[in-house]
Structure formats: C-alpha cells, structure tokens
Amino acid sequence: MCATRKMKKFVVMGLLVAWLVLVSGIIVWAFDVSDVRPEWTDEGKNLALQRAKWPIKQKSVVIPSGWFTMGSNKKLDRKAYRPELPQRQVYLDAFEIDVYEVTALEYLRFVVDTERPPLPDWKYDGGNFQESMAHHPVMHVSWYEADAYCRWAGKRLPTEAEWEKAARGTDARIYPWGNTPAGLSRANFGRTGISGPVRDRPERLLLYPPIISVDKYENGISPYNVWQMAGNVAEWVKDWYDPDYYQTGPDRNPQGPSTGTHRVFRGGGWIDSTPTVRTAQRNGKAPETQANWLGFRCAADVTDVKNDVTHAIPIP
C-alpha cells in the first residue's frame, strides 16, 4: 500500500511539473507579438528620424584566414548531437564580422532610410522602442529582413562556418570563452520569465523578453573579441539548413546547401539551455520566422568592406 501511494504521488508530481512547463512555454509564446505590426504616427515618425541620428556602438573585427576546427567530437563534448558531426578541419578566407549583434537603433536607421513599418515590439511613442532598448539586439526580424539590412549596410550575413570560427577560434573550444560550462555570469540564457526595461512601463512585463545591451558580458567574448556569440538572441546566418551538411560539406569556404526550406541560426538566445548556447550547436527555421529570441549580425569580405556603418547610412 505504501509503495502504491508513493507511486501515485510520483505520477501526480510528474504531471504537475509537465503542466507547469507547458504553461510557461505557452505564456512565453503568447506574449511574443511578432504577428502584430504597429504603424507610425506623424509624431512617432519624427521621433524616429531624430533617434536615427543617435551614435551607435557597432564596429567590426577581422577574422584572419586559415584553418579551424568545425563541428563537435562526441567524445569531448557529450552534449553534441548528430547535425554537429563529424568534427573536421575547415579553411576560411579572411573576413570581417560585427563585434556586436545588430541593435534596435542600428535597425531603426535602416527602417527610416528604406521607409519600412515599425517592428512588432516598437509600440511606444507612435511606433518607437523605449529609449532603454536602443542598444538591445534587434529582434522580430526575418531572415529576409536580416539579409536586406546587411546588404543595405554594405555587408552580408556571415556563413555558418564564418560564424562558428568567429565564435570559437581555432582550438575547438565548446563555448566562446573556453570549455567551462555556460553560466549566467558569461551569457544571457536560460531565462523563461518575461522581463525587460519595465520601470516606466510595467505592462512591458507581458511584452518584452529579458534581453540586454549588446556590450555586456565582457568575460564571455570569443577569442577574436566578438561579443555575445552565446545567448541574448540567437543569430541568423546565410546558409540553408541541412542536418547532414557537416558530413558532405567542402573543407574550404563552405557556403551551405544550394537550396532548402530552413535557414540556419546559431548561438542560442535568452530562452535557451546550456547545450543550445554551445558554439557548434546548429539549427534552422523557416526564413520568414520572426521571434523575440532571434536576431543577427553582419559580416563582409575583407576586400569588400565599406565605410563604417556610422558614416555609410544616409540619415536626413
């Protein structure tokens, strides 16, 4: 009888935990308002034009040409899974990559210059983001919009291989900072609650995820001084996604499959777990996806780099 009661208690507790996980996921999903696009008011558009003149933090770094270790070795990283296998040596030409994830302020310049509507989370002052969000990574941007932004800025999305080298260097490390497991002092991840810049607008608790400025977590940068390659928001890259691509891809400047239905995203976001923010972890989403955990950064061929984005963007 005692054993039966214990079993019933165990089952009830298990069902309760499963229910709480399900409800948490539904709450996070429900408050991701990516299907709602606000419209500019005249006052909001004027404010956006003024904000577009604010200084930005973005800069780029050169990743030198050479070989690096791409993918995972299951013997060394027990969290590795099939799409990361096999681990192999890959050669890349030199390229540049943004030090920081593209911010809301940077993306606002693009929106203003190309006369696009506000993003779903720009719901204040006639279509604007809160001032405290200016240097947060932009989110709710599809792959097509990320690609368009990078082209407009005189750059491009990084390839999957370029992103991985910029994140981990050449020594096959598991995380940007080394092989020490991820912790909240190194990356913004593993957060399932809804929070954000809410002191002046408490309703943001229901609308804005717990992302932070792109220049935080100095102790979590990559060997090339690239920031937040783990956590905050996951990042679109150029390639089509194929879970078996690492088994067949070339060992020099791989560009990904020629076709597909999903585009690769890397790095994990604020909502992800420790295995997901490893540098070799890879996954894909339909390119039209817009989410509050997904952003991007840009790259460029070394010979094709344009002027700094601060000077390359025509703002009235």
Image (tube, helix red, strand yellow):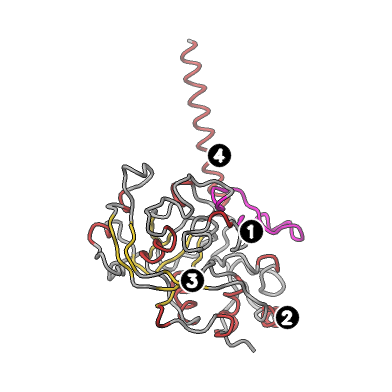
Quadrant (top left, top right, bottom left, bottom right) of the C terminus: bottom right
- Residue highlighted by disc 4: 20
Mark 3 vs mark 4, foreground winner is 3
**Disc 1 vs disc 4: Cβ atoms closer than 8 Å?**
no
Q: Crowdedness of circle 3 by 10 Å Cα count: few (<14), some, many (20+)?
A: some
Dot 2 corresponds to which residue? 43
Which residue type does callout 1 highlight? Leu
Q: Identify the residue position indicated by label 1 in the image.
A: 207
Of the two numbered discs 2 and 4 on the same chain, state the one appearing first in sequence. 4
The reply to whether the C-beta atoms of the residues labelled 3 and 4 are less than 8 Å apart is no
Residue beneath label 3, please?
61
Per the image, label 4 sits on a secondary structure element best described as helix
Residue type at mark 2 is: Glu
- In primary-sequence order, the first of circles 1 and 3 is 3
Residue 268 magenta = no
Give me the C-alpha separation between circle 1 and circle 2: 23 Å
Residue 156, above or below 226: below
